[in-house]
Amino acid sequence: MFAHHPRLLAAFTAVFLTACALCGCKEAVVEEEQDTLPKEPVPVEAVEARLTTLRPSIDLVGTLVVIPERSTVISPQIGGWIQKVSVVEGVEVGQGDELVVLDGRLAKADVAKAKASVAEKKATLARLERGYLPQEIEAARQEVRKCDEQADSIALEVAALEPLWKSKEVPDLQYQKVEASRRAAEAAQAAAQAHLELLLAGTPPEEIAEAEARLAMAHAELAAAKLNSNLCQITSPISGRVTQLFARQGAFAERSVPLLNIDDLSKLFMQVRIPSIHMANVQPGARVDVRLPTYPGQVFSGTVARISGEADPATGDIDAFVEIPNDNALLRTGLACRGRLWLPEMPNVLAIPVAAVADHAGKAVVTVVEDGKAREVEVALGTQTHDQVEITKGLEAGQWVVTEGGYGLPDDCPVKIVSNLSEPARTPDSP
């Protein structure tokens, strides 16, 4: 058939020769690669990929701050001259200890004045509640009798003058004077009678109520005067340390102007910023190991106490506050510190050492050992701790992965597993 088609025959011959040439090249490449593999197994360190419990954590940097409710600013509630400053900066004080004393002479005078007013109002109320004395009622009766007699006497005089006045024997002026005296006597008689009736009726209830109200007001004024006097002695509302002192003896203290700060340093907050990617795993009560450059090697144990409800709009980070006991009084506010916040445990996770993972063209890879040969495998990573990383894809439990000495090894490279590269090798199949 090819004899009748010379051109087709030539083409077939060319393809056949090319295929033969390619087969020869491939065998040559394979033989060349085999020639480049090391003759002796390469010693490597390796571990077995196992299911384990991961303890993830995040490292944080923060600053020690006082717990807000354990800090107080002392200010006078009244103005006055500072007579005495009883503390110095840095001293420990207890609840109720004297801090500052203001000049209280004017306040004491106000107390004495208020006490006198209370005594006066008490006496008035007691007199009204007691009612009128028999002597007072008898005196009122005598006054009525006196007024009656005067009125009768003047009435007789008017009766005697009236006929003479009508007959023009008495001047008008004289008669008018006597008549005016009669009217005045009658008015005095009515007033005396009304006063007697008032005494006989007793004290009106409204007068007693008014006296009681005035006494209550006097008591309130006395309480205010005593309070002002007590406020001249300023005491500590909490136990703690005087961290700032502004008061000076002889100076005038304005009302509500700070005199000193007192902080309870038995517990402190470490203020940190938590990246938003970890927020789902951070809960109040999480343990935090805190370290300070001031005390190298010492670890202070703390717990997450509060988490801010608002994130930083620029970074997405969220403020958190770690409560740290300060029983030995080593910690001070303002010190910088580092903390390791432990996240919830992850049980039954396939994990390998971080050192076993390498980067190959932007992909995570590991070198596995199978039948004494190394092979590079792409893996997917999950949660990472300081020394281990979770493998979510690409490995199975029981496989051996190289942790040291496997970087750059070609596939199928013979290896031998050692516990330390400086020690003799072990059998690859039984590490």
Image: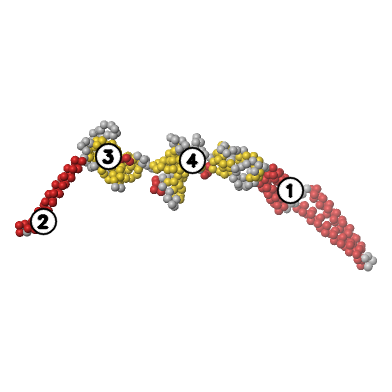
Packing grade of label 4 (10 A; few <14, some 14-19, many >=20) is: some
Q: CA distance from mark 3 to mark 2?
A: 49 Å
Which of the pair 305/260 is nearer the observer?
260
The reply, left or right, for residue 131 in relation to residue 35 is right
Q: CA distance from mark 4 to mark 1?
A: 67 Å
Which label's residue is closer to the chain start, 1 or 3? 1
Disc 4 element: loop
Three-letter residue code for mark 3: Gly
Packing grade of label 1 (10 A; few <14, some 14-19, many >=20) is: some
Q: CA distance from mark 1 to mark 3?
A: 106 Å
Mark drawn on residue 11: 2
Q: Kindly indicate whether the residue at mark 2 contacts the one at mark 4 (C-beta within 8 angstroms).
A: no
Residue sitting at 43 percent across and 52 percent down? Answer: 314
Image quarter of residue 155:
bottom right
Residue sitting at 32 percent across and 40 percent down? Answer: 355
Residue highlighted by disc 1: 124
Residue highlighted by disc 4: 335
Picture layout, residue 318 above or below residue 296: below
Which label's residue is closer to the chain start, 2 or 1? 2
Which label's residue is closer to the chain start, 3 or 2? 2
Image quarter of residue 103:
top right
Which label's residue is closer to the chain start, 4 or 1? 1
Disc 1 element: helix
Image quarter of residue 48:
top left
Mark drawn on residue 405: none
Residue highlighted by disc 3: 406
Pick the quarter of the image with the C terminus: top left
